[in-house]
Amino acid sequence: MSESSDIFRTIFEKMGDPILLLKDGRFIDCNAATLKLLAYPAKSEFLNQSPADISPAFQPDGRSSDEKAAHMIDIALREGFHRFEWSHLRSDGSIIPVEVMLTPIMLNGEVLLHALWRDITERIRAYEELRRSETKLRTLYNSTSDAVMLLNKKGFFDCNKSTLKIFGCATQEEFCTMHPADLSPTRQPCGTDSMELANQRIATAIDKGNHHFEWVHKRADTGNSFPAEVLLSAMQLDGELVLQAVVRDITKRKEAEEEIRHLAFYDPLTHLPNRRLLVDRLKHTLASARRTGRYGALMFLDLDNFKLINDTHGHGMGDLLLIEAATRLNNCVREIDIVARFGGDEFVVMLNDLDVDKTKAIASAYTVAEKIRSTLSAPYVLTLNSHGKTGGTVEHRCTTSIGAIVFADPKTSTDDILKRADAAMYQAKEGGRNTIRFLD
């Protein structure tokens, strides 16, 4: 667990954008980028403040910072995510505009708010310059690292140099022959047809003046997809309604977010779901049982005498055995089932959507349990590599004790299911190990 925490802390501190954690409306942690942006010399001088404490009395829209901050937090907690712009105060009293992304997260059993800031000073300055001067417009248009393009009813008619780089086109003329549908996969991650959803986004931008959203684009040269932030702005140009699209490639940010999510919900050694993710999936399984009447099953597995391999051959070999056991377990179940690691040599298997008849459900679960017991009992041939060199090969045999229950009552708590399966596993160990016990 400490390894996971260390990795999380490293990512947290090295992110280029400010990252903060809020608890009960006050900042309890932040990374170095936050202190740099707000010009605070140390965390001790910054933490324990509320968003309103480091904001001017009123935001640009005229609302009080205190009232609006509470409203933004409420939206994030209710919707699961909220993005908005905000004016903060640096330690010297100067105002700095940021884009804020608030996401509720569970950490150590508490609901916290994860805040990601982006300094948008340059973006705001750029838009002010765009309004002032046609010459400055063209300069900024071609110097920004974001892709900027203009389109009317006929399609694209202008773009900057970054557009060509991001979308893999050689010339502006080549890009302007593209149809917007050529720059997106057939469907977006939500499953909606890209053309249909793009038309909805455009209509929203025209109706509201601008529209900010995430989108999956693809390059014209390779066809490779990439995630992007898109800002569509409607404007009049030479008496014609046109749309300006600003596209930012957010691949690196998505990768960092996915790594953080993986650390929060997956075991760092085996990459199996951890206890937190399993409990969440168990709740979904219980909800499904309520709808379908089908039983699920939960199995606790403990590798018998696992300590022996650590004591005899070292923890490196023990880790290899755990990784191989995780692979074997995944091969024993269906895609709809879940294999998790709770730590040490303890694994959990959850079988979904078995049968409406309890006797048949138990029989199906027992068949899988026996397959697992047999599979995990096969010899393990483990080769330890260190710095690219082979450190020796060991053959090891390891049996497993399995405790299982079937469940379908949605009123049963997840804790009760876990405790009963754990108790069944201890019965299996007390019964001589390398055996299976079902608890009614």
Image (cartoon, helix red, strand yellow):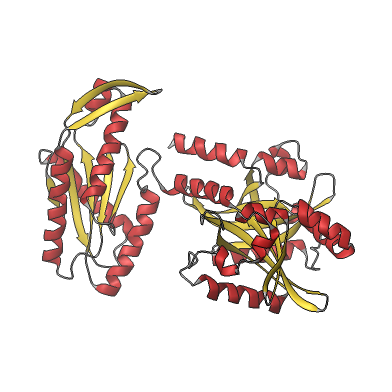
Quadrant containing the C terminus is bottom left
Compared to residue 59, the image places residue 435 above or below, namely above
Q: Which of the 4 quarters of the picture holds residue 325?
A: top left
Relative to the observer, which residue lies in front, 237 or 122? 237
Task: Looking at the picture, tell me which residue is in the foreground, 212 or 340.
Answer: 212
Q: Position of residue 273 (x, y in %)?
A: 36, 49
Q: Residue 397 appears at what percent x and percent y?
A: 16, 31
Q: Is residue 55 visible in this depiction of the protein?
A: no
Where is the N terminus found, in terms of image quarters? top left
Q: Nearer the viewer, residue 182 or 14?
A: 182
Pinpoint residue 227: horizontal percent, then vertical percent.
56, 57
Residue name at image x 32 percent, y 44 percent:
341
Q: Image check: 330 left or right of 261?
A: left
Nearest the viewer among 109 and 174 is 174
Number of disc labels: 0
Q: Which residue corresponds to the image point at 50% horizontal and 66% vertical from the top-left?
A: 188
Q: Is residue 210 visible?
A: yes
Give the residue displayed 85% in from the left and 49% down from the top.
94
Where residue 310 appears, as percent x and y from the top left, is: 27, 25
- The residue at 36%/55% (across/down) is 279
